[in-house]
Amino acid sequence: MKTCKRCRKKRADVVLSGVRFCSSCFIEYFEKQVQRAINGEKLGVQMFSKDDRILVAVSGGKDSMSLWNVLNDLGYETCGFHIDLGIDEYSEASRRVVENFAASKNLDLIVVDLRKEYGRSLFELAARDACSACGLVKRYLMNKVAHEENFSVLATGHTLDDECATLLGNLTRWNLEFLRRQHPVLESTHPKLVRKVKPLFRVTDEETAAYARIKQLNYVREKCPLARGATSLSYKNALNELERRHPGLKKAFYLGFLRNKALFGSDEGFELKECEACGMPTANVGRCAFCKLLERSEQ
């Protein structure tokens, strides 16, 4: 019997990058990685404390459900936030998973239904590029609800894999504006912009899957139909192959970027305005991108 490399007593039932864990030791490891991220280790800034009210964006997938569960287990005050995008059976299943979890844990949950709130599903809002519109809608509504409901922090379930794929994409395009903004902690730069954090940036997709399995979390296993063919998936596949050959490469890649982030310059001095229609922060003159999207969908 192969035993856990930590306690060296129990049977190992989780193997990640050749490292064997028993279930209890893996959960301890996972929680420690999340707590290290929250404490700001290697970041120089704490994400939040037990005094903060945290709005957790939950899609129903393994990463966001794992985030909500681990923050709850670590004793933080959380409320879930879910957007029903109206993507047929996928959105129905996602909403059901999130609502059932909230009910089982007696946790607060805020749901925004696009059809009920704005009279249109995501597909009806986006004439052509639904995937791009989805990101725009999510970013806008997450911040809007966090601000209006007086949450001090907005937490998303982005993992190390997500951050590495985004970093690789930004580097291949030399998108300096995005490279300057990429960080696990995005501070508020406007009174209506809530601090955004990524407490899972130290753990991988594989690790959140193992955590969800051990914790017996129900989550939507089907990939979003809009994600098919997404460039980020190609980047993830390439990084996974590199990680297979060189264990630890992803963490070294991303943490190295954070250490040398100053090389890409600073985005300080960039002033946000307020949308003339909704009043939310925007880089645009006049209406924000979300209000423009609504306007185009009416035409």
Image (cartoon, rainbow, N blue to C red):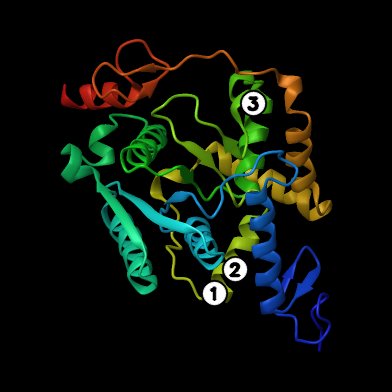
Please say if the residues under marks 2 and 1 sit with CB atoms less than 8 Å apart: yes
Query: What percent of the width, then of the height, locates residue 234?
Result: 61, 42
Residue at the (57%, 64%) spot, across then down: 74
Classify residue 64 as left or right of residue 121.
right
N-term mark: 3 or 1: 3
Residue position marked by numbered label 2 in the rendering: 211
Q: Residue 273 appears in which quarter of the rendering?
A: top left
Of 39 and 292, the residue lying toward us: 39
For badge 1, the amino acid type reads Lys
Classify residue 66 as left or right of residue 95.
right
Classify residue 228 as left or right of residue 114.
right
Res. 228 visible in picture: no
Query: How far separated are the C-alphas under marks 3 and 1?
Result: 35 Å
Q: What element carries label 3?
A: helix
In the picture as drawn, the residue positioned furthest to the front comes out as: 51
**Label 2 crowd bin: few (<14), some (14–19), many (20+), radius 10 Å:** many
Q: For the N terminus, which image quadrant?
A: bottom right
Residue position marked by numbered label 1 in the rendering: 215
Please say if the residues under marks 3 and 1 sit with CB atoms less than 8 Å apart: no
For badge 3, the amino acid type reads Leu
Q: Which mark is residue 179?
A: 3
Q: Relative to 280, say whether 243 is above or below.
A: below
